[in-house]
């Protein structure tokens, strides 16, 4: 019996077609469940039930110090449950890139909202993680606080590489896929002055201190979106 | 049967034809006609992202935008991904139920997913 419980905390994941077109193939035992990002499912075997939950995400944008605007965005997660025969679910991502699987054992992981793919049922997902308040509105990024025991699957835009921080390390916020909350982090400007940081195109960076791992992606979705979006012509 | 945009090239021994795909295919966004390749020789076909080959015996569910090619003996039926709420808010919309025995090819990325994402940045 006990082995069954342990089995259900972990997901049997096989990442295929790495690194450019990674897809996660998850093999489920009978009755096993997991949670995934809305829209991530590519294919699945018959007899798997899907349901959706809505999370209201609120975040605050401070401007002129005392005025605040609350943004409400809905965030959807799909839950999959295998039937009597078990089954397979294949999950993909929007952008070309890689994926990685992380087994959590109670520690906290912060994942960029767009990088989350799936997790086993005992993993808690906090959609209102507010560690980087000022960053959220500016770069259009949001972050998920993830903790518990089990498996988490994360995807990246481009290649993904872990950096084991010991001391200090600086990463452009748009390139952060995930990091361990055991690290101290604070947002700062990239250069010496705010003017050079903004004109230099680096914008905000995150300075990590202490011990822990940061997963970094080679491409930046926000920059890609801004470059591509501004070049598209309106239809007449 | 590769989907319309997937076909790239084939040997001379391969015949290309068009087959009525049925209205079910229209709902899945694949159009009313299907390309059929048959005969002897190699066929090249491509997709957006990577291609996974899957051996099916029975039923398998594929997100409609991810099905690249399948064997002509197989039957496709469009259906909702889950309940009405899940299908529209859960982001999966329509899925295709593939029935039969044989190989299917699915792509790991989806152009309409990219287009939706790009639209948010205009």
Image (cartoon, coloured by chain):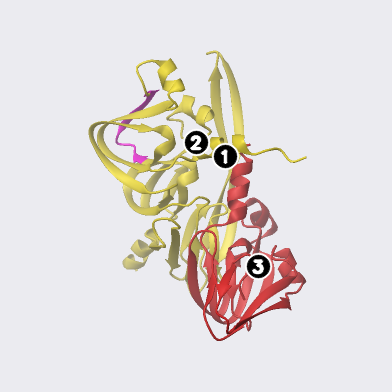
Chain colours: A yellow, B red
Residue picked out by circle 1: A228
**Horizontal and vertical percent for residue B47?**
55, 63
Discs 2 and 3 share one subunit = no
Residue picked out by circle 2: A223
Q: Is residue A5 inside the magenta stretch?
A: no
**Mark 3 Cα shell of 10 Å, populated few (<14), some (14-19), many (≥20):** some
Q: Residue at x 44, y 16 (%)?
A: A195
Along the viewing direction, whichever of A43 and A107 lies nearer the viewer: A43
**Horizontal and vertical percent for residue A202?**
42, 27
**Mark 1 Cα shell of 10 Å, populated few (<14), some (14-19), many (≥20):** few
Give the mark toward the camera: 1 or 2.
1
Along the viewing direction, whichever of A189 and A85 lies nearer the viewer: A189
Image quarter of residue A66: top right
Image quarter of residue A57: top right
Chain assignment, label 2: A
Along the viewing direction, whichever of A108 and A236 lies nearer the viewer: A236
Image quarter of residue A169: top left
Residue picked out by circle 3: B4
Residue A73 seen in this snapshot? no
Q: CA distance from mark 1 to mark 3?
A: 27 Å
Q: Is residue A183 left or right of residue B27?
A: left
- Asked whether disc 1 touches disc 3, contact meaning CB atoms under 8 Å apart, the reply is no
- Asked whether disc 1 touches disc 2, contact meaning CB atoms under 8 Å apart, the reply is no
Give the mark toward the camera: 2 or 3.
3
In terms of sequence position, does the residue under pointer 1 or pointer 2 come before the other? Answer: 2
Q: Which residues are magenta?
A: A179-189
Q: Residue at x 39, y 28 (%)?
A: A205
């Amino acid at each position: 019996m006990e082995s069954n419980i342990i089995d259900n905390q972990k997901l049997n994941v096989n990442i295929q077609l790495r690194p450019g077109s990674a897809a996660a193939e998850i093999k489920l035992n009978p009755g096993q469940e997991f949670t995934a990002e809305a829209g991530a499912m590519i294919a699945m075997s018959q007899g798997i039930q899907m349901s959706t939950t809505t999370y209201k995400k609120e975040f605050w944008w401070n401007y002129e110090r005392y005025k605040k605007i609350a943004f409400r965005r809905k965030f959807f997660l799909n839950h999959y449950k295998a039937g009597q025969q078990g089954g397979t679910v294949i999950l993909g991502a929007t952008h070309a890139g890689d994926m990685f699987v992380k087994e959590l054992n109670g520690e906290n992981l912060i994942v960029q909202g767009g990088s989350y793919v799936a997790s086993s049922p005992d993993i808690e997902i906090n959609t209102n993680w507010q560690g980087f308040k000022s960053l959220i509105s500016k770069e259009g990024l949001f972050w998920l606080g993830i903790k518990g025991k089990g498996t988490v699957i994360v995807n990246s835009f481009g290649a993904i590489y872990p950096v084991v921080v010991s001391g200090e390390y600086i990463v452009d916020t748009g390139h952060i896929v995930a990091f361990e909350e055991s690290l101290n982090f604070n947002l700062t400007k990239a250069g010496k002055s705010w003017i050079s940081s903004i004109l230099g195109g680096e914008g905000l960076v995150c300075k990590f201190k202490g011990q822990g791992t940061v997963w970094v992606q080679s491409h930046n979705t926000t920059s890609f979106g801004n470059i591509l979006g501004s070049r598209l012509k309106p239809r007449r | 049967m590769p989907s319309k945009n997937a076909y790239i090239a084939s040997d001379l021994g391969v015949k290309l034809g068009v087959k009525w795909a049925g209205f079910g295919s229209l709902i899945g966004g694949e159009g009313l006609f299907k390309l059929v390749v048959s005969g002897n020789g190699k066929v090249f076909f491509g997709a957006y992202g990577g291609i996974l080959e899957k051996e099916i015996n029975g039923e398998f569910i594929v997100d409609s935008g991810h099905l690249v090619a399948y064997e002509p003996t197989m039957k496709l039926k469009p259906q909702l991904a889950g309940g009405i709420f899940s299908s529209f808010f859960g982001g999966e919309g329509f899925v295709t139920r593939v029935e039969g025995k044989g190989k299917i090819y699915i792509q790991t990325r989806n152009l309409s997913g990219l287009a939706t994402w790009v639209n948010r940045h205009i």
